[in-house]
Image (spheres, grey):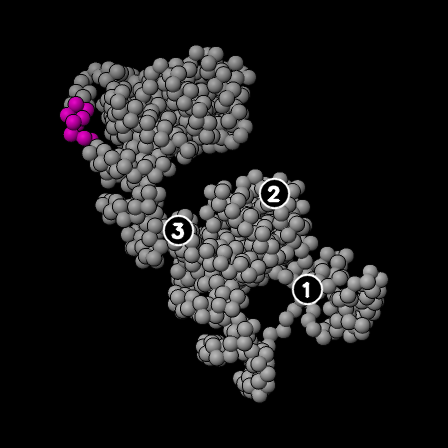
């Protein structure tokens, strides 16, 4: 009989010392029971099981196994049965080496023939992550019961495999019990899994297990996981009995959905009213809901409740408290919670780095000193803070750290670096990071395209877009960036904007607020007023961006009446204007000469605190007053600009002086301009034109000499024309006065001359005053033809 005794010396001695001490309250009873068991010459089986189970419930598996070992060493092998071996195997969960010894003992002793022992062996291997061994045992079972199936079912790591096994169980005629249902419900992941879960719900109703608490809890969790809060609520309400897990499941379900924050708070309060004791899971759900609802008052009450309950220093509770205070814009309170934490994990530090961006590098250093290892979310928050403060050197250091620690393989970290370098105006570095990506997803392309667009590299942005649509499905942010690039680039053909518009229609993104606003803005900036109106009319939601874009489009065309009508309509809709809206309206007033109306809008905007006037708005007002001849008023307003008048305001005022021949004021303004920007050609040209209007050619010549001496050259004005290349060229043809660069210039001149003659004939035939001179010179013909192409 001694052959049944297993030598446990090699696997019990080391681990026993590592276990935590048993609490004082339980120590006397368990130790006393063990002493009685050891001293008793005829220990019975229930006492063995009870002793081991007591230690297992105390998470002290080593002492449970010691009981089994001691019993074997005291020469009582005959009193061991399959139940004792099954309990001993239960104590081996998480200790596969010990479990393998017991497995061998069960084989040599014959206990392996018992189904309960085999089920315990499968459970031990499943919980030790040795699922293949558990599956081998299951396949050797002659008559597996529902416990055998449930044990294997709980061991699957892949949800789809678990659901397939459940279908096999059903096909084999295995009757599901509550454990089966709750296990399978926890594996219902993905869209197919959710549909499977709904079918399980029907089976549960038919089998009568809907009244089982843990089955109901599993259904609430399953529905909540997929955002079907109403169904989860219905299951909860229909449960005849509810335990703490039930309440936690519904509170967490409400909280996770976000829009059910008030219901989560109500459920937590109702739970307390019914006398149910809460735990940290309940608190986390309720506090998180306060964050979504930005309910600071209830959040503070729950904070106090957590302190009274002894949960106020738990890491998980403190983390959600910090998040809630942050969402309520109470960053200092979040900081106090952080400072009061006894222990901090990566979530705690990451939250602080995200909240206090000015101290982000220092906090990151403290985090590393504290021995907390960062995760990918930490680096994303840190990079955002570094970008805002334009800390180029720090960004490059973090790049090096991420490369060393392997975080560059995380897509959100590498995508952040593409964006960071673009914000630093280091597009070569941004492109290098992008090229090193193993998998270029839509977010990666978006970061690159928006980086090009933000840096004024519209050509590269468009080329990147064409490359992106070959590899991935573009989203609204992709189109938003490329349309912004097309709108800002006069050299890119509008046909590519129209091509993007067609692509949007095919994907069904034309009604999306982001894409429709970007499309409207693109057409508006490129002067396509009819298409701008069409996009605006099709928009289901017209926000501030849309109204501003359409008003700006009409302002560029000098359509004062339409601008004012739309501005009034915007106010009726309750949409508050921003600085750009007001600037567009003032521009329209300036071009129409409606000075009093412009002044009224400007004054009311400041008085009603609608906007904080920008330098551009002041410059527009200066230009408006100057054009109207109210130069003194314009000069006074320019002096009111915060930080002093800038280049734009002074040039507007100098231009007005030229129009109205105010030489004295013009000279004073010109001196300020030349002192501010000595290399800016516009100031010299304006002053030269002012003297030319007055006939002071000597001063005109002197200014021209100053420009030559200082190396200041007048910027050449260019025009663009879409020549309609059949190869779909990215660019329009650019030309300037006296331009002879086009390869078909001779044909262009001949066609322009012919068109000029035709127009002259038509005008003469109608008896109208001709718009063209009798002799069109080659330059006029050239410009005319290019505009007509």
- In the image, 550 versus 523, the foreground residue is 550
Identify the magenta region.
Answer: 20-30
Query: In the rendered view, would you say 487 is above or below 536?
Result: below
Residue at the location (48% across, 68% down)? 630
- In the image, 19 versus 772, the foreground residue is 772
Question: Does residue 12 appear in this view?
Answer: no
Near mark 2 (Cα within 10 A), the count class, few <14, some 14-19 or many ≥20, is few
Q: Are marks 1 and 2 in contact (CB under 8 Å)?
A: no
Identify the residue under disc 1.
720
Query: In terms of sequence position, does the residue under pointer 3 or pointer 1 come before the other?
Result: 3
Instruction: Report how far apart the C-alphas of labels 3 and 2 lie in the structure.
Output: 30 Å
Query: In terms of sequence position, does the residue under pointer 3 or pointer 2 come before the other?
Result: 2
Q: Locate residue 287 relative to residue 510 in the image: left or right.
A: left
Residue 608 marker: 3
Query: In the rendered view, would you say 446 is above or below 196?
Result: below
Q: Quadrant of residue 694?
A: bottom right
Residue 666: x and y, percent?
49, 77
Q: Secondary structure at mark 1?
A: strand
Residue 454: x and y, percent?
53, 59
Instruction: Report how far apart the C-alphas of labels 1 and 2 lie in the structure.
Output: 29 Å
Q: Quadrant of residue 257?
A: top left
Residue at the location (65% across, 60% down)? 492
Residue at the location (27% across, 20% down)? 274
- In the image, 362 versus 636, the foreground residue is 636
Query: In terms of sequence position, does the residue under pointer 1 or pointer 2 come before the other?
Result: 2
Identify the residue under disc 2.
537
The secondary structure that dominates the magenta segment is helix
Residue 263: x and y, percent?
36, 28
Residue at the location (54% across, 73% down)? 660
State yes or no: residue 25 in magenta: yes
Q: Secondary structure at mark 3?
A: loop
């Amino acid at each position: 009989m001694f052959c049944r005794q297993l030598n446990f010396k090699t696997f019990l001695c080391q681990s026993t010392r590592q276990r935590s001490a048993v609490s004082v309250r339980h120590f006397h009873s368990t130790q006393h029971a063990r002493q009685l068991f050891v001293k008793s010459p005829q220990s019975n089986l229930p006492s063995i099981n009870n002793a081991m189970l007591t230690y297992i419930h105390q998470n002290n598996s080593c002492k449970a196994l010691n009981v089994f070992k001691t019993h074997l060493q005291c020469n009582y092998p005959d009193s061991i049965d399959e139940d004792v071996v099954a309990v001993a195997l239960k104590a081996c969960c998480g200790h596969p080496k010990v479990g393998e010894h017991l497995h061998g003992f069960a084989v040599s002793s014959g206990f392996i023939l018992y189904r309960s022992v085999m089920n315990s062996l499968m459970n031990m291997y499943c919980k030790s992550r040795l699922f293949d061994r558990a599956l081998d045992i299951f396949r050797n079972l002659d008559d597996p019961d529902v416990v055998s199936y449930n044990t294997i079912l709980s061991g699957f790591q892949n949800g789809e495999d678990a659901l397939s096994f459940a279908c096999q169980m059903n096909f084999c005629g295995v009757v599901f019990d509550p454990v089966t249902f709750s296990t399978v419900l926890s594996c219902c992941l993905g869209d197919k899994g959710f549909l499977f879960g709904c079918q399980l719900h029907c089976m549960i109703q038919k089998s009568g297990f809907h009244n089982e608490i843990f089955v109901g809890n599993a259904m609430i969790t399953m529905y909540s996981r997929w955002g079907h809060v109403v169904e989860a609520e219905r299951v909860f309400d229909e449960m005849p009995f509810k335990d703490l897990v039930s309440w936690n499941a519904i509170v967490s379900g409400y909280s996770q959905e976000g829009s059910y924050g008030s219901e989560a708070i109500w459920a937590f309060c109702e739970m307390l009213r019914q006398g149910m004791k809460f735990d940290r899971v309940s608190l986390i759900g309720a506090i998180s809901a306060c964050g979504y609802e930005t309910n600071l008052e209830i959040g503070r009450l729950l904070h106090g409740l957590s302190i009274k309950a002894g949960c106020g220093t738990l890491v998980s509770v403190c983390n959600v408290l910090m998040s809630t205070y942050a969402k309520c814009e109470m960053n200092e309170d979040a900081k106090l919670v952080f400072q009061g934490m006894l222990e901090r994990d990566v979530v705690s530090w990451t939250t602080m780095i995200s909240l206090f961006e000015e101290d982000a590098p220092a906090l990151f250093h403290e985090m590393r000193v504290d021995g907390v290892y960062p995760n990918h979310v930490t680096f994303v928050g840190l990079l955002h803070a570094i970008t805002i403060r334009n800390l180029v050197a720090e960004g490059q250091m973090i790049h090096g750290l991420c490369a060393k620690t392997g975080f560059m393989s995380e897509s959100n970290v590498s995508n952040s670096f593409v964006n960071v370098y673009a914000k630093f105006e280091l597009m070569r570095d941004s492109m290098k990071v992008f090229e090193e990506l193993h998998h270029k997803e839509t977010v990666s392309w978006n970061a690159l395209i928006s980086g090009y667009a933000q840096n004024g590299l519209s050509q590269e942005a468009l080329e990147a877009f064409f490359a992106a649509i070959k590899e991935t499905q573009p989203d609204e942010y992709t189109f938003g960036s490329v349309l912004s690039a097309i709108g800002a680039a006069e050299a890119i053909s509008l046909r590519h904007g129209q091509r993007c518009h067609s692509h949007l229609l095919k994907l069904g993104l034309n009604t999306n607020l982001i894409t429709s606003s970007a499309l409207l803005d693109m057409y508006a900036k490129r002067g396509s007023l009819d298409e701008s109106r069409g996009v605006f009319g099709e928009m289901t939601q017209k926000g501030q961006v849309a109204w501003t874009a359409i008003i700006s489009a009409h302002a560029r065309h000098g359509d004062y009446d339409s601008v004012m009508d739309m501005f009034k309509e915007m106010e009726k809709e309750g949409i508050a204007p921003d600085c750009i809206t007001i600037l567009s309206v003032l521009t329209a007033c300036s071009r129409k000469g409606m000075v009093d109306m412009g002044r009224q809008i400007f004054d009311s905007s400041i008085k009603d605190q609608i906007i904080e006037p920008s330098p551009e708005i002041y410059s527009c007002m200066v230009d408006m007053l100057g054009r109207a001849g109210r130069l003194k008023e314009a000069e006074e307003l320019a002096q009111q600009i915060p930080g002093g008048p800038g280049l734009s305001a002074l040039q507007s005022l100098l231009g007005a002086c030229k129009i109205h021949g105010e030489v004295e004021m013009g000279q004073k303004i010109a001196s300020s301009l030349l002192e501010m920007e000595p290399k800016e050609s516009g100031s010299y040209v304006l002053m030269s034109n002012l003297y030319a209007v007055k006939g002071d050619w000597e001063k005109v010549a002197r200014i021209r000499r100053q420009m030559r001496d200082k190396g200041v050259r007048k910027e050449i004005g260019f025009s663009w024309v879409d020549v309609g290349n059949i190869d779909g060229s990215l660019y329009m043809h650019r030309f300037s006065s006296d331009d002879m660069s086009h390869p078909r210039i001779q044909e262009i001149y001949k066609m322009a001359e012919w068109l000029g003659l035709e127009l002259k004939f038509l005008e003469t035939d109608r008896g109208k005053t001709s718009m063209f001179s009798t002799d069109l010179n080659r330059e006029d013909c050239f410009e005319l033809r290019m505009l007509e192409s």
